[in-house]
Amino acid sequence: MKNISIKQYTALQDTLMYDAVLEHLKPKNIFAGRSMDTNKMPYANVKYCIRLLPKINSWEDICQLFTICFDITETEFWASPIAEYFPAKKYLVSEFEKIITTESKALSSQSTDAHLWHMAGADRLKPYSDTLPLLQLGKLFGQYPFDLGRKPYGEIFSLLVQTKTQNEVEHDYQKLNSK
């Protein structure tokens, strides 16, 4: 088995021999000589990649994902060794799974008014779930929301968690104060 390029791998009629071996490699944060750091990636890119992952159905989609995450060119992607692709893919998927889990834990709330929120039509906001947090931060800091989308993911996520916590404390304080 040769360590062929991704381009050569995609041209193979039968990839079973490669798949059987390479699927067992451990995740590794290195691809085409670069590593991926989601905390430094723009917030909008991280959200785009999370939306792209379940829709991937071609090598062009995979190439797009890797070029965004590892900040490489398409040429670098296709020329990279297939033995680098499999561990990098495992790392990339696990990293986005961690982000999704962390976000859902850190940004979810158990409001007693949740049923009212849903009755008011909260489901209509789902298509805007990536930009609504930016809109809220933009209002808070007096910035254009899409400019915030170009800021590093780690910074935006931190601000979102802080803002959520502050809002919860203020809400609880108002409830106590009104009694």
Image (cartoon, rainbow, N blue to C red):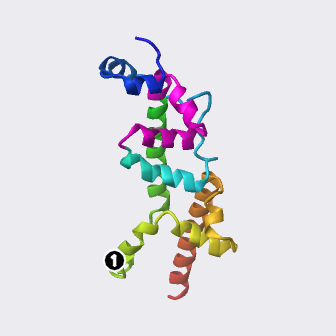
Give the x, y percent position of residue 116: 36, 81
- Within 10 angstroms of label 1, few (less than 14), some, or many (20 or more) residues? few
Towards the viewer: 80 or 146: 80
For label 1, the residue is 115
Give the x, y percent position of residue 14: 30, 21
Q: Tell which residue pokes out farthest to the bottom in this image.
A: 178
Residue 110 seen from this side: no
Residue 54 within the magenta-colored segment of the rendering: no
> Magenta segment range?
57-86
Say left or right for 143 vs 160.
right
Residue drawn where x is 49% and y is 31% of the image:
88
Residue 119, placed above or below residue 93: below
Find residue 89 and report its image quarter: top left
Find residue 160 and report its image quarter: bottom right
Towards the viewer: 149 or 118: 149
Towards the viewer: 10 or 145: 10
Residue drawn where x is 44% and y is 12% of the image:
2
Residue 113 seen from this side: yes
Towards the viewer: 38 or 18: 18
Magenta stretch secondary structure, dominant: helix
Residue 78 within the magenta-colored segment of the rendering: yes
Residue drawn where x is 63% and y is 71% of the image:
138
Q: Amino acid at mark 1?
A: His
Give the x, y percent position of residue 112: 39, 75
Q: Tell which residue pokes out farthest to the top in this image.
A: 1
Q: Secondary structure at mark 1?
A: helix
Give the x, y percent position of residue 152: 64, 52
